[in-house]
């Protein structure tokens, strides 16, 4: 490989201190470094160094994202501390109502711009579902500008009081930075997917100040496997993200937890029962989050409303809920913390569960930006605290304090919604440092996840991706049939050495492998001509049944290698 040595660019730089060669030598250095990384990208050390860089970038991006939300909140509510519930409670009702409406107008304007400039594929801010789809379908590729645009929409949304989470958009931003790095270094799809997981791990680790949870969330939710070759770089990125967060925010976690009270034996069956209650709530939550946006979009179509005009209407509705229950506004970590410390009575807790479900559904259905992790943590904490209060009246002194069940509920509900039982258990462990609470969470979240998945047939992200036509929950074999296209394995017409009969069925170049195999089987054909769908629809190739089966087997082998390598 004839790489110029950096020293080549430095010749002459010694004799002319103010010579333009200075800039030239720097450019040569940079080109040399990028070329070395591209050439050795598959080498573990280079991959780890790149992972550390991505984890650091994702950490800083997440930090900037958090601070920007607080700065916008300061503009809307006059306080840029993470205490939105108590701040809003002290303001006049008209102020609380108008903030999300004005925020909705700004979000609407941003969506209008995004639609005009084609900065986003859909008229909505992107989140975790797009990252998972990029891993499964798009070779680990996320556009950088959609990442920036989505972050901007979410900053305005959450700062103005819309009820959603900040972790999902931070994950998307981390993934977009990782994807940009992969494109700059010209890496293959396999390494791009590994680095995508690194961006996610760095963002989650920085969000929660929880590196272990960052690592496991990336593997469990985004990659969907635990191949040995991806664990090391992802762990490096998660550590880098957490180090960035710690150096700026100190060691305290996302929200302060009370000291965890000790549990007695009876609390573990009670935790299992709470797991089943959380499953019921998770099923309602997932259904609302998937069906809500779909029905609101249909209604907007019938009324002739453009989608970018939806956020101000959503702002009116969320603002009305916020007047009655300021605890549901924004990310909601102050209210979550209050519930964990036993600050709410039983009836208020039950009202807050209903209000938060409704406010989050309206926020996301009316195209505000935001994620689902914080609302699911909020709902779990409220439901757990309510369960703890009830357990206290039934079991008397024998039951653990409501705080114990609030922590268990928090883990169980969020784990069931995201389909991430292991990561959420670890987040709870990293936040509480309590072994007992973590065991109770593991028990509750396992039950909650199994029951939720059995009824909803997939976690909330898989359900969102299903609306776009891809089935992820059945593993790679179904996805290969949906993503490989006929053009990927057909024999071009120029290379064919036989006449094609046009009597039977015809396939198009952009038909899926699944459609091709289904057609060949249904018509009992050994092959079929392939036409272009556009223009004069000329015949451009031919596929045989053997070609189709070979393409399927080849992709299955590649998937198996990636998942077990």
Image (tube, helix red, strand yellow):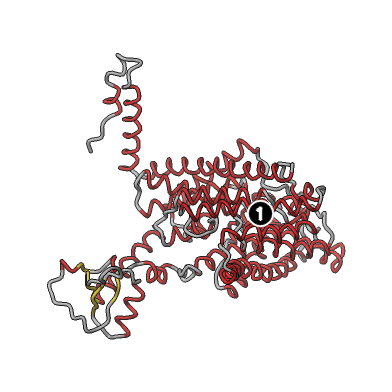
- Vertical order, 494 against 235 (above or below): below
Give the residue displayed 72% in from the left and 67% down from the top: 274
Residue 80 shows in this picture: yes
Of the pair 126 and 208, the residue shown nearer to us: 126
User: Is 27 placed left or right of 375 in the picture?
Assistant: left
Q: Quadrant of residue 74?
A: top right
In what quadrant of the picture does the C terminus appear?
Answer: bottom left
Q: Quadrant of residue 556?
A: bottom left
Hey, which residue is sitting farthest left in the picture?
497
Residue 298 image offset from top left, x and y in percent? 57, 71
Of the pair 553 and 466, the residue shown nearer to us: 466
In the rendered image, which residue does mark 1 sit on? 428
User: Is 492 placed left or right of 273 in the picture?
Assistant: left
Residue 107 image offset from top left, x and y in percent? 60, 52
Q: Residues within 10 Å of mark 1 (few under 14, many from 20)?
A: many
Residue 156 image offset from top left, x and y in percent? 62, 48
Q: Quadrant of residue 32?
A: top left
Give the residue displayed 82% in from the left and 66% down from the top: 390
User: Is 548 placed left or right of 310 in the picture?
Assistant: left
Q: Secondary structure at mark 1?
A: helix
Q: How many marks?
A: 1
Residue 83 image offset from top left, x and y in percent? 75, 46
Of the pair 309 and 141, the residue shown nearer to us: 309
User: Is 69 placed left or right of 490 in the picture?
Assistant: right
Residue 376 shows in this picture: no
In what quadrant of the picture does the N terminus appear?
Answer: top left
Give the residue displayed 41% in from the left and 59% down from the top: 138
């Amino acid at each position: 490989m004839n790489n110029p040595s950096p020293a080549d660019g430095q010749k002459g730089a010694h004799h002319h201190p103010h010579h333009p060669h200075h800039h030239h030598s720097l450019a040569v250095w940079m080109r040399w470094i990028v070329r070395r990384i591209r050439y050795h990208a598959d080498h573990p050390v280079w991959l780890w160094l790149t992972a550390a860089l991505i984890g650091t970038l994702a950490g800083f991006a997440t930090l900037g994202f958090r601070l920007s939300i607080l700065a916008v909140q300061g503009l809307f509510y006059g306080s840029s501390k993470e205490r939105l519930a108590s701040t809003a409670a002290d303001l006049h009702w008209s102020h609380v109502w108008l903030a999300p409406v004005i925020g909705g107008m700004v979000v609407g304007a941003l969506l209008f711009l995004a639609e005009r400039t084609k900065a986003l594929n859909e008229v909505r801010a992107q989140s975790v579902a797009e990252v998972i789809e990029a891993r499964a379908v798009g070779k680990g590729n996320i556009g950088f500008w959609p990442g920036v645009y989505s972050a901007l929409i979410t900053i305005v949304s959450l700062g103005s009081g819309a009820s959603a989470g900040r972790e999902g958009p931070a994950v998307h931003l981390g993934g977009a930075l990782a994807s940009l790095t992969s494109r700059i270094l010209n890496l293959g799809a396999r390494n791009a997917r590994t680095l995508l997981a690194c961006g996610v791990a760095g963002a989650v680790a920085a969000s929660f100040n929880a590196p272990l949870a960052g690592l496991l969330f990336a593997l469990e939710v985004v990659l969907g496997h635990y191949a040995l070759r991806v664990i090391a770089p992802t762990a490096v990125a998660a550590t880098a993200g957490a180090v960035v967060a710690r150096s700026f925010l100190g060691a305290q976690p996302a929200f302060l937890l009370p000291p965890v009270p000790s549990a007695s034996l009876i609390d573990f069956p009670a935790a299992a029962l709470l797991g089943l209650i959380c499953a019921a709530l998770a099923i309602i939550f997932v259904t609302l989050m998937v069906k809500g946006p779909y029905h609101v979009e249909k209604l907007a179509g019938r009324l002739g409303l453009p989608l970018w005009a939806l956020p101000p209407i959503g702002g009116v509705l969320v603002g009305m809920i916020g007047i009655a229950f300021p605890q549901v506004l924004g990310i909601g970590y102050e209210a979550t913390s209050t519930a964990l410390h036993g600050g709410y009575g039983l009836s208020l807790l039950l009202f807050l569960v209903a209000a938060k479900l409704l406010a989050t559904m309206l926020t996301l259905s009316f195209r505000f930006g935001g994620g689902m992790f914080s609302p699911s943590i909020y709902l779990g904490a409220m439901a757990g605290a309510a369960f703890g209060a009830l357990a206290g009246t039934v079991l008397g002194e024998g039951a653990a304090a409501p705080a114990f069940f609030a922590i268990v509920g928090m883990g169980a509900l969020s784990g069931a919604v995201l389909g991430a039982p292991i990561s959420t258990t670890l987040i709870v462990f990293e936040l509480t440092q309590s072994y007992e609470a973590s065991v109770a969470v593991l028990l509750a979240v396992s039950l909650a996840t199994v029951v939720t998945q059995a009824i909803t047939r997939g976690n909330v992200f898989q359900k969102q991706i299903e609306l776009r036509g891809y089935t992820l929950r059945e593993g790679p074999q179904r996805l290969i049939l949906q993503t490989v296209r006929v053009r990927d394995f057909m024999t071009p017409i120029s290379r064919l050495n036989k006449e094609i009969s046009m009597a039977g069925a015809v396939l198009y170049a952009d038909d899926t492998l699944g459609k091709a195999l289904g057609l060949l089987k249904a018509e009992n054909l050994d092959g079929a001509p392939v036409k272009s769908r556009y223009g004069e629809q000329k015949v451009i190739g031919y596929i045989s049944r053997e070609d189709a089966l070979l393409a399927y087997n080849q992709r299955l082998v590649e998937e198996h290698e990636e998942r077990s390598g």
